[in-house]
Image (tube, helix red, strand yellow):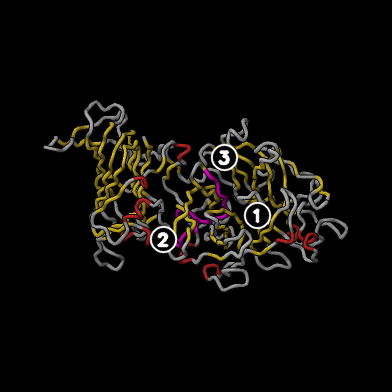
């Protein structure tokens, strides 16, 4: 895609002043990605999967106040020997630190999977929860005597004074008086539940409720005595002592609830794994990944409850599942599962892994990606539903705490022309459409439309992103014009203010369109980036479409817009 902005900023007068009107001035701009593939990394990121051979990420942010030495970074831990740890300022560019733990000579033998770390402010310690397999034991040891390695998967707990380690296996006497050594798995379900069968577990996820109560969520792994992967949960008495009496099954593959009605979206799956929990407005949102990591459909799905241990009911696929996953025709991403939530300021992001082979998938290798999450009210369910603006392989705004610019579109009063129905409200709701279930949350116009965003007070802006329709027959090919009521000009402009700034013919990047297959690569926008200027209103005109006919050859004038993002600051 061509880069339009000049090396030295200049503003050209293109229209004379008419009676009662301000001058029109052309605003130089970038349209996003240069011919050499570069883009402004101080404003945007793209899921290039540069952190590869990595899977099952766990992530936490450490503030400078929490840790004066190591604070100010996001820390990510991934599956692998020694649980590699890396850090980042922006959730996109990661610095490798090294291994976070040594498990040689301990009960941990192999299958070092899915580490997650939480901070306990009461003692200033970092606790790592993970799964690993143990050696074959005998009837006099804590180990299972089964020859099936799935039976010998245990939950591990390690502790450190810093987010980078070295973590050491927790040892000592737990709240039940049980002595834990480096040779003793700290959570033994067979022993704790008093059952004869072996219970292997993976994907251990710790979650603090608002009252400080710790819960562990985990996947009970398929084994010689258990035919499916399913999500379970339980309370913890403290950071290391399980309350086995509260252990509860939370999901069952192919069922809306354990033992409940068939859930046809997962009809072919025997796997619900990789649990994660987030709480919003008193409701618990349990996310998990069905189908298995090697499947391109591997994704992030959702069940909800009003209690941390359920009953959890899966969201119907026609309403909101998968939350973060692909449609069958996607070729830009695949295998987008096993994720964690991380907060960056007021924003929520999902860090997840995806197949490096985007179009066909293969399970391995996998790389790390990140996308925004939000809660959007759902009229059918009567409560907020978790939504992902992803999976993306297109330019997206960096976290506002990193770039210094946030999406201020929702601050504006919006007026439109030629709208169809009550859809103007979807222009600034923060929701980018990725699936048919949220396709109705797009703006629609009958032909050319003018969209004006008016701010109550001047705002400093540096980019406008107009996200395209999910549907090829509604998608636009370019933005005709973006006009600004400018009250403070960009640096270097020597003319008078106010004036009406104009940007014309902002294209949609060809990489976001598959015209040969009649579909859009979801998450793409027409982007105009420019030197910061202070404005009071923005008017966007759209008339050019990808096609004037639908797939059957019928004429169609409808234009669809998924969302508008204005990167700016309140002044």
Up the image or down, 560 lies above or below 405; here it is: below
Residue 331 covered by magenta stretch: yes
Work out how far the residue at label 1 is from the one at label 3, CA to CA, in angstroms.
20 Å
Left or right of residue 253: residue 180: right
Q: Which residue is mark 3?
A: 74
Is residue 367 in view from this perspective? no
At which x and y percent is residue 435?
43, 60
Camera-side residue of 529 and 394: 529
Residue 380, percent from left and from top: 44, 66
Question: Which quarter of the picture shows residue 219?
Answer: bottom right
Tell which circle, 1 or 3, labels the residue nearer the N-terminal end: 3
Tell me the quadrant of the picture where the N terminus can be found: top left
Point out which mark residue 7 bears.
none
Main secondary structure of the magenta stretch? loop
- Residue shown at 73%/67% (left/top)? 224
In screen coordinates, is 96 left or right of 151? left
Magenta-highlighted residues? 323-343
Where 473 sits versus 397, above or below?
Answer: below
Q: Sequence-wise, which precedes: disc 2 or disc 1?
A: 1
User: Rounded to the nearest whole Å, what is the CA distance between mark 3 and mark 2?
Assistant: 31 Å
- Numbered badge on residue 203: 1
Q: Quadrant of the C terminus?
A: top left
Q: Residues within 10 Å of mark 3 (few under 14, many from 20)?
A: many
Q: Give the SS element for disc 1.
A: strand
Q: Secondary structure at mark 2?
A: helix
Q: Check whether the beta carbons of the residues at disc 1 and disc 3 lie within 8 A of each other.
A: no
The x, y position of residue 106, in whole percent, is: 79, 46
Determine which residue is flagged by label 2: 438
């Amino acid at each position: 895609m061509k880069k339009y902005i000049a090396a030295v900023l200049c503003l050209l007068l293109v229209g004379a002043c008419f009676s009662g009107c301000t001058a029109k001035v052309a605003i130089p701009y970038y349209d996003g990605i240069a011919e050499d593939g570069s883009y402004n990394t101080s404003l945007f990121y793209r899921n290039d999967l540069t952190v590869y051979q990595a899977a099952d990420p766990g992530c936490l942010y450490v503030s400078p106040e929490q840790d004066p030495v190591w604070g100010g970074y996001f820390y990510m831990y991934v599956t692998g020997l020694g649980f590699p740890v890396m850090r980042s300022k922006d959730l996109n560019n990661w610095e490798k630190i090294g291994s976070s733990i040594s498990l040689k000579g301990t009960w941990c033998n192999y299958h070092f999977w899915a580490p997650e770390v939480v901070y306990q402010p009461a003692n200033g310690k970092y606790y790592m929860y993970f799964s690993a397999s143990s050696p074959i034991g005998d009837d006099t040891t804590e180990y299972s005597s089964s020859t099936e390695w799935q039976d010998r998967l245990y939950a591990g707990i390690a502790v450190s004074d810093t987010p980078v380690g070295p973590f050491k296996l927790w040892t000592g006497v737990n709240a039940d008086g049980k002595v834990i050594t480096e040779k003793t798995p700290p959570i033994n379900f067979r022993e704790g539940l008093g059952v004869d069968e072996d219970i292997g577990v993976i994907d251990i996820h710790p979650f603090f409720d608002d009252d400080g109560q710790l819960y562990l969520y985990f996947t009970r792994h398929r084994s010689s005595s258990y035919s499916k992967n399913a999500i379970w949960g339980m309370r913890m008495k403290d950071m290391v002592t399980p309350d086995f009496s509260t252990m509860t099954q939370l999901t069952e593959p192919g069922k809306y609830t354990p033992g409940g009605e068939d859930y046809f979206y997962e009809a072919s799956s025997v796997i619900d794994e990789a649990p994660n929990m987030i709480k919003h407005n008193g409701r618990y949102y349990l996310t998990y990944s069905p189908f298995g990591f090697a499947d391109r459909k591997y994704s992030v799905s959702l069940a909800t409850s009003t209690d941390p241990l359920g009953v959890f009911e899966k969201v119907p696929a026609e309403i909101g599942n998968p939350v973060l996953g692909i449609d069958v025709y996607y070729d830009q991403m695949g295998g987008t599962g096993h994720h964690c939530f991380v907060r960056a300021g007021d924003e929520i992001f999902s860090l997840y892994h995806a197949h490096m082979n985007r179009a066909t998938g293969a399970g391995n290798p996998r790389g790390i990606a990140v996308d925004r999450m939000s809660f959007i009210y759902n009229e059918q369910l009567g409560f907020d539903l978790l939504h992902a603006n992803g999976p993306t392989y297109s330019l997206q705004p960096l976290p506002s705490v990193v770039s210094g610019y946030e999406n201020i579109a929702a601050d504006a009063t919006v007026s439109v022309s030629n709208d169809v129905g009550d859809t103007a409200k979807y222009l600034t709701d923060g929701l980018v459409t990725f699936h048919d279930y949220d396709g109705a949350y797009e703006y629609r116009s009958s032909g050319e439309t003018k969209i004006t965003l008016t701010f109550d007070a001047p705002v400093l802006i540096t980019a406008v992103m107009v996200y395209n329709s999910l549907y090829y027959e509604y998608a636009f090919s370019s933005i005709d014009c973006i006009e600004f009521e400018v009250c403070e000009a960009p640096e270097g402009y020597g003319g008078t203010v106010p004036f009406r700034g104009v940007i014309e013919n902002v294209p949609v990047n060809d990489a976001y369109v598959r015209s040969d297959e009649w579909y859009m690569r979801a998450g793409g926008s027409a982007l105009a980036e420019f030197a910061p200027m202070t404005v009071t209103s923005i008017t966007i005109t759209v008339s050019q479409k990808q096609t004037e006919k639908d797939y059957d050859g019928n004429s169609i004038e409808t234009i669809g817009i998924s969302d508008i993002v204005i990167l700016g600051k309140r002044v």
